[in-house]
Structures are given as C-alpha cells and as structure tokens.
Image (cartoon, rainbow, N blue to C red):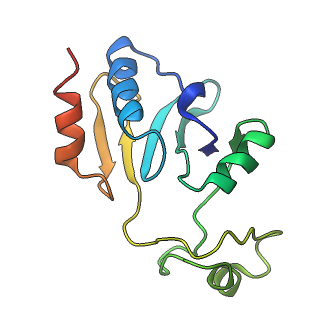
Amino acid sequence: MCASSMARKTAPKKNASRFCSRISGTWRRGPLTIILVAPRRGTLAFRVPDHPLARRLIAASGGGLPVTSANRSGEPDARTAQEVIAQLDGRIALVLDGGTTPGGVSSTVVDCTTDQIKIVRQGAISAAEIDGVLATVA
C-alpha cells in the first residue's frame, strides 16, 4: 500500500507505536516500508513515496492506494515507464510516466506488528541507521 503521508498509520501496541512513530518520523517518505496490524486483514505493508506527483495522486484517491512493485518477480527493477510496459504489458491498465526513477536499492521493510521491531528486508536504510533511531526512544 502506498500512502500520501504517515499521518494515517496506527500500531497495536504502545511500544511498537512509539518505535514506529520514531522510525516513520525520521524517514517520512522514501525507501521505508512499514508493516502494521490491519483490522480484518492481518497485516498491511505501506510506504510513502518520495515522488511528489505520486503523493498527490494517492492523496486525491483518498490517501492510500494498493500497489505492487513495477516489475515481475525475479526481474530487474523498472526505472522508466517503457521498462514497466516491457515487463508488465497486458497485466496492468495504466502507467503514469513520472520520468526516470533513481532506482538502485529497494526500500527497507520493518515489521512493527509486535513490541519487537524486526527488519524484514534491509534496503536503502541500513539496520544500523534504524537501530540508532530506536536507541533514542526512551
């Protein structure tokens, strides 16, 4: 799920909420994906894109859009609209061309569903950076 801002997130436990609030406050948008408990759904992973046009589109749609990565599993990340179409032609209805993405390292995925914060996938934000932020939570 992509969100237009971090304002809508909630976490089930006080510690997880405090830790997630600190993490999401440090990286308000960009390469951070947070997993939270979702009522009636189990869990939900979300992030706020760094691209301003993407955030405006998401905000205009109500603040959240269910999305997936713009590449086929096991294939390289698509960095342009043309690369997305080459990989996903016939599987998607629309490609919004916002120019070439910076690409590179994937988002870091952090599980905040329990009191114990867990890094599910280390990406652009290192475990050391997250640990440093969590160490400041009293």
Q: Vertically, is 123 above or below 99? A: above
- Residue visible at 55% across and 77% down in the picture: 79
| Direction from residue 107 to residue 132 in the image, left or right | left
Quadrant assignment, res 25: top left
Frontmost residue, 11 versus 97 = 97
45 relative to 98, above or below: above
Residue positioned 54% across, 71% down in the render? 101
Quadrant of the rendered structure where residue 3 is? top right
Q: Residue at coordinates 40% horizontally, 15% vertically from top-left?
A: 13
Relative horizontal placement of residue 121, taking residue 74 as reference (left or right): left
Which quarter of the rendered picture does the C terminus lie within?
top left
Residue furthest out toward the right: 93
Relative height, residue 59 to residue 82 (above, below): above
Indicate the position of residue 15 as horizontal and vertical percent values: 32, 16
Closest to the observer: 34 or 25? 25
Which quadrant would residue 5 be assigned to in this image? top right
Q: Residue at x 63, y 52 (%)?
A: 52
Image coordinates for residue 65, horizontal then vertical, percent: 70, 46
Report x, y in % for residue 53: 69, 55
Q: Is residue 94 left or right of residue 75?
A: right
Residue occupying the far front of the picture: 52
> Is 103 situated above or below 134?
below
Q: Is residue 38 visible?
A: no
Residue 134 visible here = yes
